Image (tube, rainbow, N blue to C red):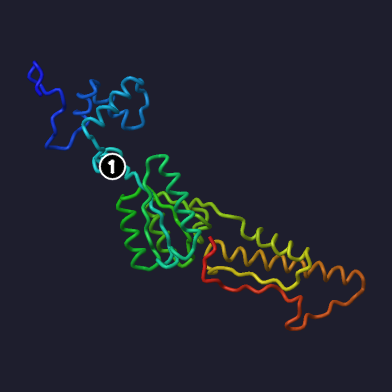
Amino acid sequence: MPSQTGHSDRLKPMDRRPTIDDVARAAGVSRGTVSRVLNGGHWVSPDSLAAVNAAIRKTGYRINPHARSLATARAGSVAFLLTESQNRLFEDPNFAVLMRGAASGLAEHDISLVMLLAGTEAEQRRAINFITAGHVDGALLISSHASHQHLLGELVSARVPVASIGVPLGFERTIGHVSAQDSVGAADAVAYLQRIGRSRIATIAGSQDTGGAWPASAGTRSRWGRSIRRSSRRATSRGTPVPRRPAGSSSAPPTSTPSSRPTT
């Protein structure tokens, strides 16, 4: 019902999308105050913050992502760039854990996670075009392969912020990355197995063109080699000749068996 002043007591439904100016009028504050609230609420009094939030609910205001992107030069999203096949996405539980962790961390900053599969050349080309076009603010690289030099090179050349889970082979000094000490871990595992009396040791590694598989294999071989050399020195110091290892003996060095699952 209209009031005595001739104005509606309620904000009339709008035929157009509500704007910041509509929110400012409804809240009785300046446009700048509304803008500060929308950008985190810094330097806004509690009363003004409450008034603006109430006005946003009343007017049904929604942030225009395209306008914000133009104003801030930010997309508000980050790519989860998985350089594996679609099947591998559902086979390996590590990817779900990484995705959940990344999405949760970004959500705390109101940033969306966009998944991009880039296992094939066609997918990598589309991913490059999408990322370099500014649809995301950066990329989280998952399961990088040495055979994907072109993909990484394009992102680096375009100055796209990239962080890698695992060592980005060929770009170790260019792309920031987080990785486990796979070589040290594998050597420690071999040492432990030797301490408890195991002598026939095998390692199951992933594709050797990933940043985690080949260091693990190298660590295993390195530890085994050191053990053999120590045994040789001890036998030599006692004047005992070191026999050659017969084929198939229990002291054969560990073998590396490729796995269908990548090491991340």
User: Residue 123 is drawn in which quadrant?
Assistant: bottom left
Q: Position of residue 54 (x, y in %)?
A: 27, 27
Extreme bottom residue here?
Answer: 247
The image shows residue 32, relative to residue 181, as above or below, that is above
Q: Position of residue 179 (x, y in %)?
A: 56, 54
- Residue that label 1 marks: 69
Q: Position of residue 2 (x, y in %)?
A: 9, 22
Side of 223 where 75 appears, left or right:
left
Side of 197 where 142 appears, left or right:
left
Side of 148 where 180 appears, left or right:
right
Q: Position of residue 118 (x, y in %)?
A: 39, 63
The residue that appears at 83% across and 71% down in the rendered structure is 232
Q: Nearer the viewer, residue 21 or 151?
A: 21
Three-letter amino acid code at the position of disc 1 = Ser
Extreme top residue here?
Answer: 4
The residue that appears at 64% across and 66% down in the rendered structure is 218
Query: Quick one: quadrant of the N terminus?
Result: top left
The residue that appears at 45% across and 56% down in the rendered structure is 141
Q: Nearer the viewer, residue 72 or 261?
A: 261
The residue that appears at 28% across and 26% down in the rendered structure is 52
The image shows residue 250, relative to residue 5, as above or below, that is below
Tag 1's secondary structure? helix
The image shows residue 202, relative to residue 170, as above or below, that is below
